[in-house]
Amino acid sequence: MANIIDGKKIAAEVREEVKREVAELKARGVTPGLAVILVGDDPASQVYVRNKHRACEEVGIYSEVHRLAAETSQDALLKLIAQLNNNPKIHGILVQLPLPDHIDEKKVIDAIALNKDVDGFSPANVGNLVIGDECFYPCTPHGCMVLLDKIGVDPRGKKAVVVGRSNIVGKPMAMMLLARHATVTVCHSRTRDLAAECRQADILVAAVGKPELITGDMIKEGAVVIDVGINRMPDGKLVGDVHFESASQKASWITPVPGGVGPMTIAMLLKNTVEAARRA
Ligand code: NAD
């Protein structure tokens, strides 16, 4: 039976670490600051933005939320980003996605100054991640790496399989595991034999968005299983991309959903914001 990776507890530890780091920076006269921009009134985005703001307040990070109407022009949004790029009180800038259709998401993300891109989604930051230069680790895969570290699993030399190749999770996850010397395979919707690939994994990361796609028979005995998926079922229940019950018969460690990777994402955003302030 697998050990459970308690993301809630580990995220709380990270937030405590951040709180101490913020206090140290404040003692040196620097208050880390995060600006979050929300365009439109998507209900899920509103909840995310509120949670991010609250999390900042709890650890002593200055945070400002810019709520813009759905019909805000791209130019107005770019102007605001330019102002924030030049604002010394702000160390991190985050644009909550998705943006309304009339706005070019890529252009907007690319406008965020590289040293303030705490989400890590800009092409320049991604390039630095691939090269292995100083960069911000995108928050969700960064959270997965911290979970591995906290349970004492070193990726070095291990076979890691990442299922999903999105720009926000799968691809950066693969790069981070590679940087930590794992042998990495990335699987996706066109992978021919997903089960056979997964069975090779010492570390298996699922970031697909398909409820319980990965079942116990696809997991190697003793593997570490990190489930990024968050899927809401018709009955309102949240499940991951991994079938928890069967997978935990085989894995040595496994994240639950909810309470695994989920709580880590905001914690890592706080961490990145402090890092941005420290570099500034
Ligand atoms: P996405 O839709 O952008 O990407 C999904 C990936 O899965 C694609 O690369 C696709 O090729 C692959 N895929 C689809 N079907 C497949 C199949 N049958 N076999 C193998 N691969 C397949 O999704 P995303 O944004 O990367 O998110 C993935 C999941 O992680 C979602 O459930 C999302 O809600 C969750 N998520 C959680 C957090 C968090 O915990 N904070 C953050 C981001 C995403």
Image (cartoon, rainbow, N blue to C red):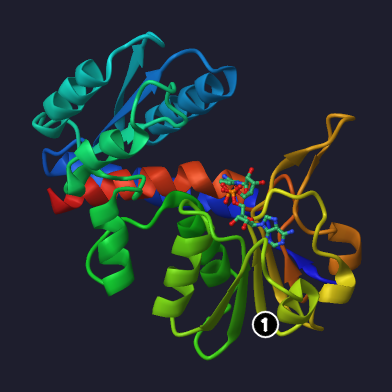
**In the foreground, 218 or 150:** 218
Q: In which image quadrant can residue 220 be found? A: bottom right
Q: In the rendered structure, which amino acid carries the disc numbered 1?
A: Asp
Q: In which image quadrant can residue 230 be found? A: top right
**In the foreground, 170 or 86:** 170
33 left or right, relative to 193: left
Residue drawn at point x = 60 percent, y = 85 percent: 159
- The residue beneath circle 1 is 202
Image x and y of residue 83, in percent? 12, 24
Dot 1: element: loop
Image x and y of residue 61, in percent? 31, 33
Residue 256's place in the image compared with 224, above or below, is above
Image x and y of residue 172, in percent? 44, 62
Image x and y of residue 80, in percent? 19, 21
Q: Residues within 10 Å of mark 1 (few under 14, many from 20)?
A: many
Residue 216's place in the image compared with 112, above or below, is below
**Can residue 60 be spotted in the picture?**
no
**Can residue 153 be spotted in the picture?**
yes
